[in-house]
Image (tube, rainbow, N blue to C red):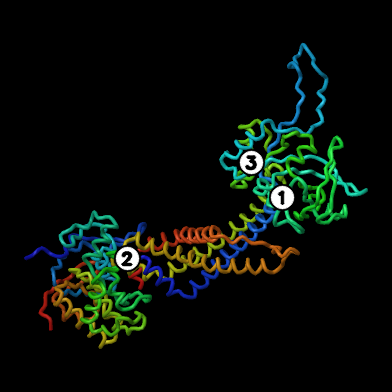
Amino acid sequence: MADPLVLVDGVTKSFGREVVTEVLHGIDLELHAGEFTALVGPSGSGKSTLLNLLGLLDRPTSGRIVLGGRDTTGLDEGERTALRGRSLGFVFQFHHLLPAFTALENVMMPMLAARGREEPGMREKAFALLEEIGLADRASYGASKLSGGQQQRVAVARALVLDPPLVLADEPTGNLDTESGAQVFELLRRVSERHQTAFLVVTHDERIAARCDRVLTMVDGRVLSDERRTPA
Amino acid sequence: MPFEVLVALRFLREGRTQTLLILSGIGVGVGVIVFLSALISGLQASLIERTLGTQAHVVVRAPEDVVRPVTRPSSERAVAARLEQPAQRLRSIVAWPQTLELLRTLPGVRAAAPTAEGPAVAQRGLATRSISLRGVEPASFRLIIDMAPRMTDGEFQVDAAHAVLGVELAADLGLRRGDKVRIEAQGARSEVFVVAGLFDVGNKDLNERWVFVPLRSAQTLLDLSGGVSTIELKVDEIFSADRVASAVASRTGLEAESWMERNRQLLVGLRSQSASSWLIQLFVVIAVALGIASVLVVSVVQKSREIGILKAMGTRTAQVVRVFLVQGAVLGMVGSALGILLGSGLALFFARLATNPDGSPTFPVALTPSLFLGAAAVATLTGLVSAVAPAERAASLDPADVIRHG
């Protein structure tokens, strides 16, 4: 098998100084390119903590995370930020668009942050992604003028704009009605296949989990099961 | 447009009301600074102009006579119980034409004019008045004090037959342009001149005492036989007059007195005025800085979610810092532009509010490009400095924490 895109090796995570609470107890995990994985489990099982560690937003207490063949343990904050921008996309539960910018500008934002200013081709690339998610006609709309489902779709386009090999999605449909949630999930699957992007989707929704290639179940800070499925 | 500038401008636009309020605050602050500076500078410039309008910047004259003991006193030998100071007589500057040429070449000296000055009496019929006789070469003297704009009647025509005197003296002696006046100096030397013109230098005392005659006539009347009692200088930069005077004294061995020395009290007054003005402006700057800082701190709290997203997307900490520094600088710049308009408008309104009898404004204002640039620079710098703490606060935001809490 090819080298994993992400290797999680004996990762633990504790919070608190005087009263130390360990929320992850030695996680071992591999994620592969193009894989669409669901991460499920009850609240407090450590899903979001693991997601933050994989997203280089937080550091493990022990163990190591290797991303794209690079061990992230010794990286300083600047290197982690650069690697995060280059290798990872994020889709949050509350879509988290920047309300001061248009849909198109929100999609462009990771490119602008990475390059420091607008460069030729950026606008076109962001627009193509908006077309792909069916929101080309909303390109010039302010983010706050879009519906919840539309905002989440824009957030998906934004997560993909730098062609990251892995997108981390935290309850991407959790804040949407059933129909919008289904549309967004379909979109995630579609772009994952088209761009060969790996997705790790944290969800409580069994129906969504059932349609993923792989389901990781976490309970009490441990990966209880790792099932590979044929999507329904 | 750089990423940081784009984000900063959008953040400011997004918090429109807040931005407008703080811009108004900065505008008023900078307006006060501009108005106050323009007013103080204008008043000071006007005061200096009025003072220097009738004075040379530096007056050079021969050293005063001093009595020196023949031998040095010692404990064994008393020379004199006390030294009697001599009465000062009018003395000519030795080799004045060469000295004049030397002074004209000194750095910082713009013009030099020889004058023969001394006490005399003006007489018309039975009326007499003691005067200060000023013998000048009109061409060189014009470069020191331009009398032309101060002439109320006739012109500044000073030649062998003509003299020019002040309006008060003319009134005292009942003289008009074209009348004859006798000038009598020490030793009963006297000459008769036709009054070519009358001047008003804005100082009653000088209008009563000054009489301008040609240099040669004054030399004869004052018994200076070809000599001059003083050389008057105009310098390039008025506040360098002290320095120029010292240079003149050391180069020539003559006594050189600057306008600053002659008007020490005026300078002390001006400096106190400037100091109070600076103090007020400092407090205004502090108030503006606190205003900008508080608005940006609130903005960091309000925008913490956006900052977290930006950081999660790969925005570097330094970029986040710059976003807030740019906001501070933009607030300072735009606020200063508003303040310059406000301050200038207020200053011009104030200047037109009241005028002196001669038509000049009672409150003259000095609105100069350097004042505007200075105000803009201070406001922008204040904005930048005020943004440092909020920027650091924004930079320290943990994206995981922000995202976790939505």
Earlier in the chain: of badge 2 and badge 3, it is 3
Q: Nearer the viewer, mark 1 or mark 3?
A: 1
> Residue A96: x percent and y percent?
33, 75
Q: Earlier in the sequence, mark 1 or mark 3?
A: 1
- Find disc 3 in the rendering and name its residue: B242
Q: Which mark is residue B54?
A: 1
Amino acid type assigned to the residue bearing label 3 in the image = Asp
Furthest toward the bottom, the residue is: A179
The amino acid marked with disc number 1 is Thr
* Chain of the residue under the numbered disc 3 shown in the image: B
The kind of residue on which mark 2 rests is Lys
Mark 1 burial class by Cα count in 10 Å: few <14, some 14-19, many 20+: some
For the point 66% across and 67% down, the residue is B350
Query: Which chain does the residue under circle 2 lie in?
Result: B
In the image, taking residue B252 as reference, residue B24 lies left or right, namely left
| Residue under label 2 | B311
Q: Is residue B101 above or below residue B213?
A: above
